[in-house]
Image (cartoon, helix red, strand yellow):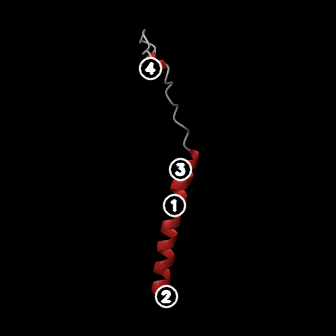
Amino acid sequence: MNTSALITMLVAQGIVISFASYFFYKVLTIPPKPEPDSYSENDDELVRQEKE
């Protein structure tokens, strides 16, 4: 393998590893989104549905 091919391969692998590392770190450090309370959406309903 000649020098230019080796440099190209190392640069390409470095770019791929950099992107993968960046997005993996970003996924691990984002705060979780608060999930809505399913009961708070039903507060305005006065009558519950009857089970059949």
Residue type at mark 3 is Lys
Q: CA distance from mark 3 to mark 2?
A: 34 Å
Q: Find residue 43 and name its label.
A: none
As helix, strand or loop, the secondary structure at mark 1 comes to helix
Report whether 5 appears left or right of 25. Answer: left
Q: CA distance from mark 4 to mark 1?
A: 39 Å
Residue type at mark 1 is Ala
Sequence-wise, which precedes: disc 3 or disc 1? 1
Residue type at mark 4 is Glu
Which residue is nearer to you in this view: 36 or 16?
A: 36
Q: Which residue is mark 4?
A: 41
Q: CA distance from mark 3 to mark 1?
A: 10 Å
Q: Do tag 1 and tag 2 residues touch (Cβ < 8 Å)? A: no
Q: Which residue is mark 2?
A: 3
Mark 3 vs mark 2, foreground winner is 3
Sequence-wise, which precedes: disc 1 or disc 2? 2
Mark 2 vs mark 4, foreground winner is 4
**In terms of image quadrants, where is residue 46?**
top left
Q: Is the residue 47 above or below the residue 26 in the image? A: above
Residue 37 placed where, x, y %? 51, 24
Q: Do tag 3 and tag 2 residues touch (Cβ < 8 Å)? A: no
**In this figure, what is the number of numbered marks?**
4
Residue 4 placed where, x, y %? 45, 85
As helix, strand or loop, the secondary structure at mark 2 comes to helix
Residue beneath the point at 49% across and 67% down: 16
Mark 1 vs mark 2, foreground winner is 1
Q: Going by the picture, which residue comes out furthest to the front?
A: 52
Q: Which residue is mark 3?
A: 26
Pointer 3 local density, CA inside 10 Å: few below 14, some 14–19, many at least 20: few
Residue beneath the point at 46% across and 14% down: 43
